[in-house]
Amino acid sequence: MKRIAVYPGSFDPLTNGHLDLIGRASALFDELVVAVLTNTGKEEPLFSVEKRLAVLREVLRSQRNVRIDQFEGLLVDYVRSVGACAIVRGLRAISDFEYEFQMALMNRHLCGQVETFFLMAGEAYTYLSSRLVKEVAQLGGSVHGLVPPQVEALLEERYGRARRRKGKG
Ligand code: PNS
């Protein structure tokens, strides 16, 4: 039986920490589905779902057992719909734990057959988050080495252009 896991998230934007985790998880399962949540209800996303999916597809195109998809609604319903047995989430520091613990137990309450696996990203990424990448890029700092080149280019396009316009005005 094929062991499929789902790695869900917003990926807004994709970071090298996410990629590290995808590498680790894809080595443990027959197939890893990286699933972008489309209805976050959070603040306005930085990049559209289409753009985030396109970046993921491009960056991960050579990874044979990784599939990119999107989902809405309950995660466990999506996990069941793709025949997966596991959810993969990354843990960076203790501060992640409470939120992740609540989500894992809620998902277990909703569907006892699906297990959540927590993986630690490499030490180099313990301080890295999409939120901080956005903030640094917006304020003109370098995110080189923290995100894949495709994301760096998109951030430059988004914020660099705005800064140059401001500089001229
Ligand atoms: O990368 P993120 O934004 O921390 O990912 C959060 C995500 C997508 C895993 C989480 O918001 C989620 O699973 N949303 C789907 C809604 C759901 O199933 N909620 C109830 C169980 S906690």
Image (cartoon, grey):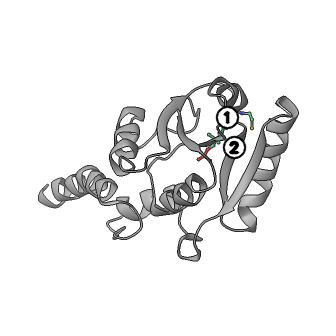
Q: Nearer the viewer, residue 161 or 40?
A: 40
Front residue of 167/15: it is 15
Residue 38 in view of the camera: no
Crowd tier of the residue under label 2, counting other residues whose Cα lies within 10 Å: few below 14, some 14–19, many 20 or above: many
| Residue 105: percent from left, percent from top | 85, 43
Q: Which residue is mark 1?
A: 84
Asked if the beta carbon under badge 2 is closer than 8 A to the nearest atom of ligand 1, the reply is yes
Q: Secondary structure at mark 2?
A: strand
Which residue does the image show at 44% across and 46% down from the upper left? 64
Q: Is residue 90 above or below residue 86?
A: below
Amino acid type shown at disc 2: Ile
Residue 124 in view of the camera: yes
**Residue 147 placement (x, y as % from top left):** 39, 62
Image position of 132 with respect to 67: above or below: below
Ligand 1 located in image quadrant: top right
Q: Horizontally, is 135 left or right of 58 in the view?
A: right
- Quarter-wise, where is residue 120 in the image? bottom right
Look at the image and tell me in which quarter the N terminus lies.
top right
Horizontal side of residue 165 vs 69, given as left or right: left
Is residue 123 found left or right of 114 in the rendered image? left
Pointer 1 and pointer 2: residues touching (CB < 8 Å)?
A: yes
Inspect the image, locate mark 1, and give the three-letter code of the amino acid beneath it.
Ala
Considering the image in quadrants, where does the C terminus appear?
bottom left
Residue 97, quarter of picture: bottom right
| Disc 1 secondary structure class | loop
Name the residue carrying label 2: 87
Give x and y (percent) for residue 106.
83, 38
